[in-house]
Image (tube, helix red, strand yellow):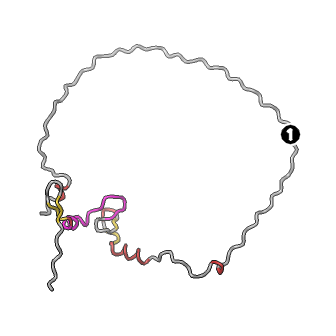
Amino acid sequence: MVARAPRKRMYRTMQGRMVDIEKLRAANESVQAVGNMNVNARGDVLGAGGQVITPKADVIKKYYEQPKGMVSDTPVKGKPMPAPKAEPVKTVQKMTPVASKPAPKKTVAPQPKKVEPKVETVTKPVESTPVETFKPKTESTAKKGIDAALDGLE
C-alpha cells in the first residue's frame, strides 16, 4: 500500500479567490497575535520587542506537570480540627442619664442675589471660506485586508 501525500485544503473567498490557509498560517507564524496575551501565532510567550521568552513546548510541558486537585483518600475525621475560640465576655458599666439641653435654632438670613450688568457685544461679519467641492479618489497602490495578506503567497 502506498502512502498518499496529505491533500492541501483550499478555501474559496466570497470574491472567488482560492486561499491556502496552511500556507497563510506558516507565513505568519512569528507575527504577534492580536489580544492581550503577548503570544505569537505559534503560541510562544513573547517579551519586550517581540522576542520569544518561553517556547510553546515549555508552556505545555509546565501545564501538564502541575498536579490537579486530587481527592485525598484519608477521611476527614482523621485530620485534627482546631478548637473553637471563646470570645471574651465584655462588661458594661451603667451610667446615669444627663438631661440634655435643646440645641439652639439657627436662622439664616437670605443673601441678596447678584445682578450682573448687561454688556452689549458688537459682532463683526465673519469672513466665509470657500467650500471645497468633491474630489474623486485617486487610485492608491496600497492593498488592504486579505489582498495585502495574500499578495506574496502565490
| For residue 62, above or below residue 140 | below
Q: Which residues are magenta?
A: 22-39
Task: Say left or right for 89 vs 117.
Answer: right
Residue 137: percent from the left, percent from the top? 14, 40
Q: Which residue reaches farthest right?
A: 96
Is 73 in front, or is 25?
Answer: 73
The three-letter code of the residue at mark 1 reads Val
Residue 30 sits inside the magenta stretch: yes
Dominant SS of magenta comes to: loop
Residue 52: percent from the left, percent from the top? 31, 68
| For residue 114, above or below residue 28 | above
Instruction: Identify the image quadrant of the N terminus.
Output: bottom left
| For residue 96, above or below residue 60 | above
Residue 32: percent from the left, percent from the top? 29, 62
Q: Residues within 10 Å of mark 1 (few under 14, many from 20)?
A: few
Q: Which residue reaches farthest front?
A: 1
Task: Say left or right for 77 vs 121.
Answer: right
The residue positioned 45% from the left and 76% from the top of the image is 66
Residue 21 sits inside the magenta stretch: no
Residue 131: percent from the left, percent from the top? 19, 27
Residue for badge 1: 98
Is 20 in front, or is 47?
Answer: 20
Instruction: Identify the image quadrant of the C terminus.
Output: bottom left
The residue positioned 40% from the left and 13% from the top of the image is 120
Quadrant position of residue 118: top left
The residue positioned 25% from the left and 66% from the top of the image is 30
Q: Secondary structure at mark 1?
A: loop
Is 82 in front, or is 127?
Answer: 82
Task: Say left or right for 137 vs 99.
Answer: left
Quadrant position of residue 76: bottom right
